[in-house]
Amino acid sequence: MKKSILFPAACSLLAWLPIHAFGGDCDTSRRASTPSSRFAVDGEEVRDKRTGLVWLRCSVGQRWDGKRCFGEIRLLRHQEARRHAAALGHGWRVPAIEELAGIVERRCQNPAINRNIFPDVAELYDNSAKYWSDTPIAEIPPLIYNIDFLTGEADGSTELARLGVRLVKGPIR
């Protein structure tokens, strides 16, 4: 089951345009859905000024070196992701689907995220970069929503699948 969160757009193929601010293929004629100005950067964390949520800039398994994320992204099962967040403490958690969808950059693909804010998102496996949410799909109880940060689309996976994890803290939206 695919539920599109990204409205498909013809992405610009003009390599000389200044699209490096977001990376990948971006339609620069469209307004950014996650402009860098929306975020307050503080080292390895960023606060979304619109939602008040605080995100880790790097995926679980990576570390922030002051400029970028380095290391291997860990692919975790859903319960492993939840346990990892709980072990970090300080309110870190797996985001709800609406929160995760809120950081999708709708004018870009490959990746569909603002790479200035969330660098080093790349294919994890099978032409995808799927990240866990903590939201079950009500219509299909064994599935939990995820977001593919290459395409920006939502999908569902069983809790035994191994996906990327991006942690958040703040009030659940």
Image: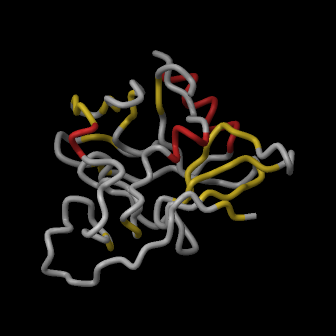
Residue 147 vs residue 8, the one in the foreground: 8
Residue shown at 26%/60% (left/top)?
22
Q: Is residue 71 left or right of residue 18?
A: right
Front residue of 81/94: it is 94
In the image, residue 58 lies at what x, y percent? Answer: 36, 43
Which quadrant of the figure has residue 106?
bottom left
Residue 104 on image: x %, y %: 44, 52
Left or right of 15 in this view: 83? right
* Image quadrant where one finds the N terminus: bottom right
Seen at 48% across and 42% down, the residue is 166
Query: Which residue is farthest top?
Result: 90
Q: Quarter of the image holding residue 173? A: top right
Q: In this rendering, is residue 20 above or below 73?
A: below
Report the residue at 58% width, 74% height from top.
Answer: 126
Left or right relative to 155: residue 150: left
Against 152, residue 15 (above or below) is below
